[in-house]
Amino acid sequence: APVIGVLALQGDVREHLIALAAADAVARPVRRPEELAEVDGLVIPGGESTTISKLAVLFGVMEPLRARVHAGMPVYGTCAGMIMLADKILDPRSGQETVGGIDMIVRRNAFGRQNESFEAAVDVRGIDGDPVEGVFIRAPWVESVGAGAEVLAEHDGHIVAVRQGNALATSFHPELTGDHRVHSLFVDMVHAKRATES
Ligand code: GLN
């Protein structure tokens, strides 16, 4: 089974570790560059993107992470993790950096105060069967994508799931629902990448 890390600086790390294990991956937390070097793919969890960004710099994983993502390591970001994978943030806080990897512009906390947290059925391209239960918590949306990025889902006319090559991002949190289909899609991406390398 592929070894998939969860960036464990801040956020809902444990829920992703459980979801990845349920999707037949070997899952482990990643904090340091040596740990990053040992995984076949990485999840960046939900949480607070400014905090994750600052801790990634502090722990010395930001640069190695950028290098691996740009070299094609499969990576999946949820919510704050989606923000981390955006090439550009519309409204960054001071000192907030991203890993990048997806040619998109994200808007933080986009779904607004009166609607800080909600659930909605989301049709995700590439996932068969029922719509995914989208859990949105102070979620970003994607303002626009570049030519290389594929929109996988929209909610209320806003882009909420995107893929570009080996990078996948969702505004919502499948790790909180017990439905592991999005994690399985990501595990399949990691398998496919490993197959091209052996
Ligand atoms: N609003 C948070 C941020 O800007 C993301 C929220 C989440 O990950 N649930 O990082």
Image (cartoon, grey):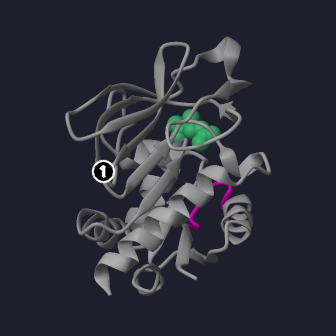
Q: Is residue 18 left or right of residue 40?
A: right
Q: Residues within 10 Å of mark 1 (few under 14, many from 20)?
A: many
Q: Is residue 49 visible?
A: no
Q: Position of residue 76 (x, y in %)?
A: 48, 55
Which residue, given by chain and number where applicable, does mark 1 sit on? 100
Who's the residue at 43% across and 56% down the image?
54
Locate the N terminus and report the quarter of the image it occupies.
bottom right
Amino acid type of the residue that numbered disc 1 sits on in the rendered structure: Gly
Query: 73 or 82: nearer the eye?
Result: 73
Q: Position of residue 66 (x, y in %)?
A: 29, 64
Query: 129 or 153: nearer the eye?
Result: 129
Q: Which residue in the rendered view is the most extreme toward the front?
A: 129
Residue segment shown in magenta? 7-13
Compared to residue 56, the image places residue 159 above or below, namely above
Who's the residue at 52% across and 75% down the image?
31
Who's the residue at 34% across and 37% down the image?
150
Compared to residue 121, the image places residue 125 above or below, namely below
Q: Taking the image as four quarters, which one is ligand 1 found in?
A: top right
Callout 1 secondary element = loop
Q: Position of residue 53 (x, y in %)?
A: 43, 54
Dominant SS type (magenta): loop
